[in-house]
Image (spheres, coloured by chain):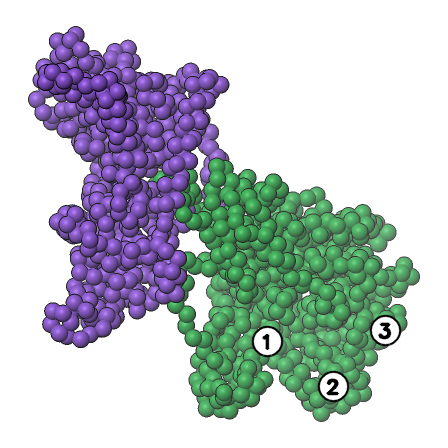
Chain colours: A green, B purple
Amino acid sequence: MNTQIHKILIANRGEIASRIMRTCHRLGIETVAVFAEPDREASFVREADQAVALGGNTSAETYLRQDLLILAAQKTGAQAIHPGYGFLAENADFARAVREAGLIFIGPAAESMEAMGSKARAREIMQKRKVPVVPGYQGAAQDLPTLAGEAQKIGFPLLVKAAAGGGGKGMRVVREAKSLESAIEGVKREAKAAFGDDHLILERYFDTCRHIEMQVFGDMQGNVIHLGERECSLQRRHQKVVEEAPSPSISDDQRKLFAQYAVQAARAIQYYGAGTVEFLLTDAGEIYFLEMNTRLQVEHPVTEEITGQDLVEWQIKVAEGHELPAAQSEIFFGGHAIECRLYAEDPTHDFLPATGKILDFAFPEGENLRLETGIETGSEVGIWFDPMLAKIVTWAENRVEATRLMQYALRKMHCLGLKTNREFLLELISHPQFARADFHTRSLETGLAGELNQQASPNQRWQAALAATAALWLGREAKREILQSIPSGWRNNFYQYQKEEFLFGGEKLTVEYRLEGDFLQIRGCEAAQTLKLVDLHEGGLRLELDGLQADFAVENAGDQFFVQLPEGRELAFERLSRFPEVEKVAEKGACVAQMPGQVVKVLVRAGELVKAGDGMVILSSMKMENTLSAAGDGTVAEVLVGEGDFVEAGKMLIKLKGEE
Amino acid sequence: MLKIPFYYLKFPPESTKLDGQSIIMKKINSQINTRSETFQSNYAQMQVLLTELDKKLVESRFQGQEKHIEKARSEGKNLARERIELLLDRDSPFLELMPLAGLGGNGFGPGGTSVAGIGLVQGRLIMAIANVGTNKGGAIDKATLDKALRLNEIAMQNELPVVNLVESAGANLPDQAAIFNFGGINFREITRRSAKGIPTISVVFGNCTAGGAYIPGMSDYTIMVKDNAKMFLAGPPLVKMATNEITDEESLGGADLHSRVSGVSDYLAANESEAIRLAREIVGTLKPANTHFQPFGLAAPPAYDPAELLGIASPDLKKPFDAREVIARVVDGSLFHEFKPDYGSTLVTGWAHIHGYPVGILANNGVLFSESAQKGTHFIQLCNQNNTPIIYLQNITGFMVGKKYESEGIIKFGAQMINAVSNSTVPTLTVMIGASYGAGNYAMNGRAYEPRFLWSWPNSKIAVMGAEQLAGVMVMIQQVAAMKAGQPLPPEQLKATRDHLIKEVEKQSSAWFATGQLWDDGIIDPRETRNFLGFSLAIVNNTQIRGTKEFGVFRM
């Protein structure tokens, strides 16, 4: 009994909502978006045929509200709900509630989700089906002594995971027994907040292994096939960073084994819909089942690129009750696809999440270039949701060519206004180790990481300063109403050059310039003596520096400047005012928010004595918790925030009376 | 931030647009042969003059001896020119006025002890005047005073807010006789402008004593820099002399006292930079200018290279050049609508645009005849009817003389033109591009006829008549007198007298002498004529332009 779907509500946000809508519209299916208030201006809301305001800020108030989502679907006449990934995508209760409301849930059976959603149960099922699992503990007893005892049996390092977790959240590596307790507490708290379930499992942790996953698909008629594997070993804090298909590091024999285990796993739970079976590949070549994700994965595009299939379309067809659109023998694999995840984070400062307004977002066009994003120029990236901004996908005949195209895309695109990992990605995929596929799941936290995040050279800083000067100059020229036809900075008794000053970290660069005919004569600058403005277009400002033309992207928010050089290097710096503020003496020993976020817990009270390194405030930003510690010994003079407060970056949270 | 129309990148723009309409006028057809000997020779001679101009401008930028400059720096002070640069909007053009005032005199050097001009602050036209405190303590010499008086006129006529950047020891005492009386005009004008709603903002950077104290004292807004600025009617030594009171500068008239206690100052600035920022903020709060007309967009440059003006203008005033060749290198697109082209041909009249501003132009093309004077009179009336500013390109050896011309009443026609020039109420700009002799100077709107601005090319000459004619006349008169006395002068003596006179008159007719006397507002590089005029037009359009129909009796 097939039901043709005409309207789908997408119970998700951002890039995946846009992605799903694209397929829907191609198929002639209307779409309904739902949105939290911070997403009101987001592109996915506009792209939907209809959109329903959920009326809250946090995930818990909006995208996790099953009742509101079902109500929205009923109100708009949507026949089906697509959960995307994350949020309620693997929530069996939701799947059940949707179906009970007479709607189609685009995903697997609730039972499958429950079977796999609990990592504990999943392990049991796999063990029964002779799919190898990582040694670990998945019992119901969750008290600390039991967990501690099991941990001793498994040995360290081990992984504390939320049984309901996924997407890198709710996971911590514990290397020594003494930090087990705090890790368990932390994971429980995160799990409770993110998934509403604080059940944990423990697993043996491998420092250097690879993460290989298989895309599987099943239908209600009992067919299960696989669509090849994805290599997702390049991760940081369990967040995938670069994914590719096919994996460059497995043999054909291993590939067959992975496929066999994956299909076996899916069959074990009569799986239908899109699913991913994740495996560990140890250095010794052992394969362990890790978990099964009963949803569409973030990195599904690489599979689409090498198979030529639209997985969202497959999901819809399966949900409509159709058989799989293709049999295993009809799936062909061609070429190589790479996906890089662009995050709002600062790789030079321990990948702290970044927030802010995207002043300029641009992506080069190309046949084999694919962009999946929910952001655009003008978007605000807040503290509310995941820091992933975009997925950049390239396809080519082989890995080397796909890599080259990815390098090109990362150099040419811009996302200016807040710190992103774009340059980090560019350096990563340009690294010889990437070319050799010589990496494991902790490469980005160990060896390889140290070789990335190159500093900008003095010449690059000068170029950025020149580009900013040119943009500022042009902006002023365009704004000048009186004396428009008099040359900029015209003097009949010339005395001094015009001047712009910038601060790069601690270094001050002064660009001195004077308009000479149709170019700016530059003085005292390492990068060029003449600057000519050639063109202003989408790609930025085309400048000719000493005869060499190239495109520079320049954006600013007040005195904060962002410049992307032609070679892809991005610099953020400050423009110095001509009229500097009279300096204020900085407060000593204060605890200041490094990024915007929500105060989870205040750990100290006024009058309390603290020692350097003592935690004072736990701040949650982008769903990551960070503990801010005292920089030195002292007494808490004043607590300026309370639990639940939202704070901006730079906000003082705790005042300390320091000891000299 | 980069949402900027592409045309701003074009140097120069491809077309002239005014209010969306293309200007429809005929392009002047230039006849200049840049390879000709005359052109080459003119060019070379003009370059010598321009080199001299550069040299004199370098002198004008002298801001005091190194030790005084070092001392100022150690006190956290900027130099006068730096203060102006900081006051102006970034990239703002700045028209420095009378930079060579006092040139050749025995004062404090060209420009005196002030730097003054017009530029943009917060996007609006203002006049900035800075005392050069590091040169003679910023004491006022005669040239500096004369310059100040002329600046007062310019500010009043064009309704320009004035920002004074004050640091002056007051009148240069040895010069007091030349300065004292008319120095009072400075204070009178500040308050007269204020009465008309044209504000003066004074920023006090250093000592400001006696009369000097009234500059900020009379101003609408006064800012003082902490620790450095001081204002008092009499300094501690004079106070001691007068009342035997012993005091120090800071408690007598420091910035703190005046800002917190006396109320003489309105703002206490922590340092110079803050003081200038405050002045800029104040400008931002002023009511907008009563602008008459503001062109939209960039104007088309002349179709002919303005650099060719150097080869066109002849330093030998006996050799005429076609005024149209000058106009062609000054006006937008070289487009010129000539009025009465076939009548009174020694005066070229017509309409054009400069930097998008509509103008009427009167330019000499030889001596003035009765017809040319009549044509000029007619044209001036038309410009008044149309509220159009007038530009006079002055290259005139005078009115035609001789029996024929006297008998046709050339005096009458000259008088008509001077009547029109005198009573015209549209703003006028005069450029001395060659000769300026005799009644021609008057009929062509010389300094006495109060053009809003008067600019001189370095080759220009100004006098009652040419040096040779003057010497010739003088020698002739002497000889006649001598012969009457029966003692004719020997030819050697006549020649010596003649040569001496020529030399003296030549010197006093030069542009250098003229600018030193402030007979103009500055000597300009002919290639920059267009920018000077465009700038001047923006300034005269800062207020409403109303022509007149009221003239004196035209003797018919």
Relative depth, front residue between B297 and A311: B297
Relative depth, front residue between B124 and B41: B41
Which secondary structure lies at badge 1?
strand
| Mark nearer the N terminus (3 vs 1) | 3
Name which quarter of the figure residue A194 lies in. bottom right
Q: Position of residue A424 (x, y in %)?
A: 67, 61
| Mark nearer the N terminus (2 vs 1) | 2
Can residue B399 be seen in the rendering of this structure?
A: yes
Label 3 marks a residue whose chain is: A
Residue located 40% across and 39% down the image? B54
Q: Which mark is residue A625?
A: 1
Residue A88, above or below A200: above
**Camera-side mark, 3 or 1:** 1
Could you tell me the amino acid type at mark 1?
Glu
Residue located 20% across and 61% down the image? B209
Instruction: Report how far apart the C-alphas of labels 3 and 2 lie in the structure.
Output: 26 Å
Name which quarter of the figure residue B530 lies in. top left
Residue located 50% across and 67% down the image? A57
**Camera-side mark, 3 or 2:** 2
Label 1 marks a residue whose chain is: A
Which secondary structure lies at badge 3?
loop
| Mark nearer the N terminus (3 vs 2) | 3
Residue linked to disc 3 = A132
Label 2 marks a residue whose chain is: A
Residue A34, above or below B309: below
Residue linked to disc 2 = A176
Could you tell me the amino acid type at mark 3?
Pro
Which secondary structure lies at badge 2?
loop
Q: Position of residue A404 (x, y in %)?
A: 75, 50
